[in-house]
């Protein structure tokens, strides 16, 4: 037995208006449609709710009992719809966001104060992970992904591009010399990633073609660790602009082999599981990032 809200509403409105015709007018339906809804309801309940005569409709005892519960159900639905409408205007609730540690630290954290001021009802939960997580398993609403997306089961919103550059600290270059050609990198301490290995192919043109796969002297799983090692004069790295803009502006890192560097951008997407409409708290966060990120990447 699956009673629909349409059937409940038809029953309550017939009682309130005193007739099937009155209910049809109030609900903007046909009299035959209201009559069929009542019939279906009584069949599902296996009882008569209304005694019908040519002049009037009269509630049965069972009908009186059921009417009270039907009103409560409809009122609860109305309250739920009103609450969601309020949330659309004033989004609220917990929002779980996942991203690589450098992205959370360098991009999301500086935006938190403004986001919280704009949406005080949303409780942000920021989780950093340098591996790709399962959103459902980790109970995550939004994850930030770099590079080409692989999982087609995810919905995604494009957030922008971030450029890759080969960098080192001035102190490292002063001690070890500045490479003048890509081949000179073999004589330097190169810092790479333990995973994914694709990050160890740098966007450099050289005699054998485009893209230079390094043999790292140091490897890290975290981009933030790679950044810190570079700033502490441990070697040459290839990192995204969003991580290194402050270090480059302050002169802590400088570009290496710019004349051989191919202009390469990594796409950044926000991904989420949703088959229907987005909740207000997810939508407002995506819109907020879409507004702020172009100037930060």
Image (spheres, helix red, strand yellow):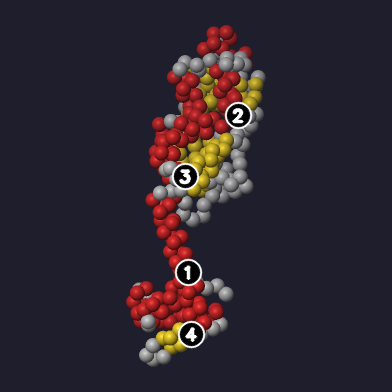
| Secondary structure found at label 4 | loop
Residue at the spot of label 2: 222
The residue lying at 54 percent from left, 8 percent from top is 174
- The span from disc 3 to disc 2 (Cα, nearest Å) is 29 Å
State how far apart marks 1 and 3 are (Cα): 30 Å
Location of residue 30 (image quadrant): bottom left
Q: Give whichever of discs 3 and 4 has the lower sequence position.
A: 4
SS at circle 2: loop
Say whether disc 3 or disc 2 marks the residue closer to the N-terminus: 3
**Tag 4 residue:** 60
Q: Residue 128's x, y, as percent?
A: 57, 35
Q: Which mark is residue 143?
A: none
Q: CA distance from mark 2 to mark 1?
A: 54 Å
Query: Dot 1, crowdedness within 10 Å: few (<14), some or many (≥20)?
Result: few
Q: First in sequence, mark 4 or 2: give its number.
A: 4
Q: Which residue is mark 1?
A: 72
Residue 66 sits above or below residue 178 on the image: below
Q: Quadrant of the N terminus?
A: bottom right
- Which mark is in front, 3 or 2? 3
Can the viewer see residue 3?
Answer: yes
Instruction: Single out the mark in the foreground, 4 or 2.
Output: 4
């Amino acid at each position: 037995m699956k009673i629909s809200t349409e059937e409940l509403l038809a029953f309550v409105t017939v009682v309130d208006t005193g007739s099937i015709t009155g209910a049809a007018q109030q609900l903007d339906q046909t009299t035959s449609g209201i009559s069929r809804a009542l019939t279906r309801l009584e069949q599902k309940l296996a009882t008569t709710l209304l005694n019908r005569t040519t002049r009037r409709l009269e509630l049965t005892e069972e009908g009186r009992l059921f009417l009270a519960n039907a009103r409560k159900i409809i009122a609860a639905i109305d309250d739920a719809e009103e609450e969601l409408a309020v949330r659309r205007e004033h989004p609220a609730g917990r929002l779980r966001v996942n991203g690589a540690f450098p992205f959370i630290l360098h991009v999301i954290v500086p935006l938190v104060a403004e986001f919280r001021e704009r949406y005080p009802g949303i409780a942000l939960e920021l989780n950093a992970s340098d591996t790709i997580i399962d959103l459902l398993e980790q109970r995550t609403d939004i994850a930030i992904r770099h590079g080409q997306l692989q999982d087609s089961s995810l919905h995604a919103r494009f957030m922008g591009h971030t450029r890759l550059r080969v960098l080192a600290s001035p102190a490292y270059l002063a001690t070890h010399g500045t490479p003048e050609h890509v081949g000179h990198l073999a004589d330097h301490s190169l810092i790479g990633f333990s995973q994914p290995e694709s990050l160890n192919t740098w966007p450099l043109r050289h005699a054998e073609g485009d893209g230079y796969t390094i043999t790292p002297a140091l490897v890290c799983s975290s981009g933030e660790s790679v950044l810190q090692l570079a700033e502490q004069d441990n070697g040459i790295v290839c990192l995204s602009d969003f991580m290194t803009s402050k270090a480059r502006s302050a002169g802590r890192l400088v570009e290496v082999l710019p004349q051989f560097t191919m202009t390469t951008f990594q796409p950044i997407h926000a991904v989420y599981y949703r088959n229907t409409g987005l909740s207000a708290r997810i939508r407002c966060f995506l819109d907020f990032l879409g507004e702020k990120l172009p100037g930060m990447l």
